[in-house]
Image: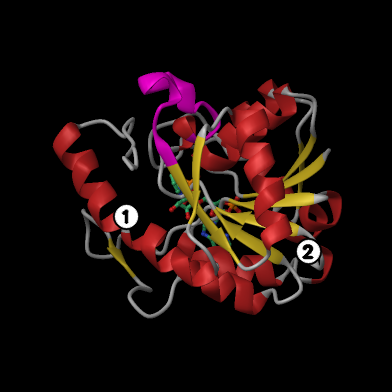
Amino acid sequence: MKIAIFGTGTVGQTLADKLAGKGHDVMIGTRDPAATRARTEKDSWGNPPISAWLTAHPGVKLGTFAEAGAHGELAFNALAGHATLAALGSAQASLADKILVDISNPLDFSKGMPPSLFIANTDSLGEQVQKALPKTKVVKALNTVNAYLMVDPGQLAGGDHSLMICGDDAGAKTSVTGLLREQFGWKDIVDLGDITNARGTEMYLALWVRLWGALKTPTFSVRVVR
Ligand SMILES: NC(=O)c1ccc[n+]([C@@H]2O[C@H](COP(=O)([O-])OP(=O)(O)OC[C@H]3O[C@@H](n4cnc5c(N)ncnc54)[C@H](OP(=O)(O)O)[C@@H]3O)[C@@H](O)[C@H]2O)c1
């Protein structure tokens, strides 16, 4: 399948690695492909530069946001929250009638750690993405776990933990649920309902960042016990 991944950070790289490894034709979207390929500095987490990652993954394509949107039959948004709306806006036409899995969180690091949310309570970034791309089927998913758990939930508790998703299009949620199960191995996927439920999964980040601080590891998750 042709897949677009918006974002060159840890999430974009981790998704691209997994999906390309499973034989999918992946293009990552970035602001300036030439500048991204020329980067030599480590990322903000001290990981090797994206140029080194691209060299190690010759099968993964790199393009502008518009080029990635045109490439993908299905797309993932792994952009910084503050950049999401403007960047996806440049790919709007190419995303019409396609599914966009929105992983972004509206985190505001401007006042240090832990970050706050720049959208909350009565709105969410997921809703704003759906409003900005009315012809695209937005499914909010994967934003509640760290990048490595997204594509390999089995590394924790044998995969016995829960993922919450939401979105307005039932068919899109069925497709994304199938992809999450078959490509990544998720077992317990809870459909919260329409895209307004992104308020819940994004506001969970207020707890997530505090658990991260307390546990000193991002490799944790929650299990919904019925
Ligand atoms: N890291 C995790 O484990 C994790 C877990 C759950 C959810 N998330 C969410 O997933 C998203 C991606 O996280 P991440 O850690 O992989 O990467 P990130 O550092 O949050 O975002 C990197 C991406 O944002 C783009 N970007 C930054 N500023 C921009 C601007 N002004 N205009 C356009 N694009 C801009 C970068 O574009 P360039 O390629 O051009 O540099 C890059 O592709 C975030 O919303 C985050 O909250 C992350």
Cβ of mark 1 under 8 A from ligand 1: yes
Question: Is 81 displayed left or right of 112 in the figure?
Answer: right
Image location (x, y in percent) of residue 94: 83, 64
Badge 2: few (under 14), some or many (20 or more) residues near its Cα, within 10 Å? many
Label whose residue precedes the other's in the sequence (1 or 2): 2
The residue under label 2 is 95
Question: Is 172 displayed left or right of 219 in the figure?
Answer: right
Closer-to-camera residue (194/115): 194
Question: Is 208 displayed left or right of 179 in the figure?
Answer: left
Magenta stretch, main secondary structure, is helix
Q: What stretch is highlighted in magenta?
A: 150-162
Q: Can residue 29 be seen in this view?
A: no
Does the magenta-highlighted stretch encompass residue 157?
yes
The residue under label 1 is 205
The residue at 55%/68% (across/down) is: 194
Cβ of mark 2 under 8 A from ligand 1: no
Image quarter where the N terminus lies is top right
Dot 1: element: helix
Residue farthest toward the left in the current orientation of the protein = 214
Badge 1: few (under 14), some or many (20 or more) residues near its Cα, within 10 Å? many
Does the magenta-highlighted stretch encompass residue 225?
no
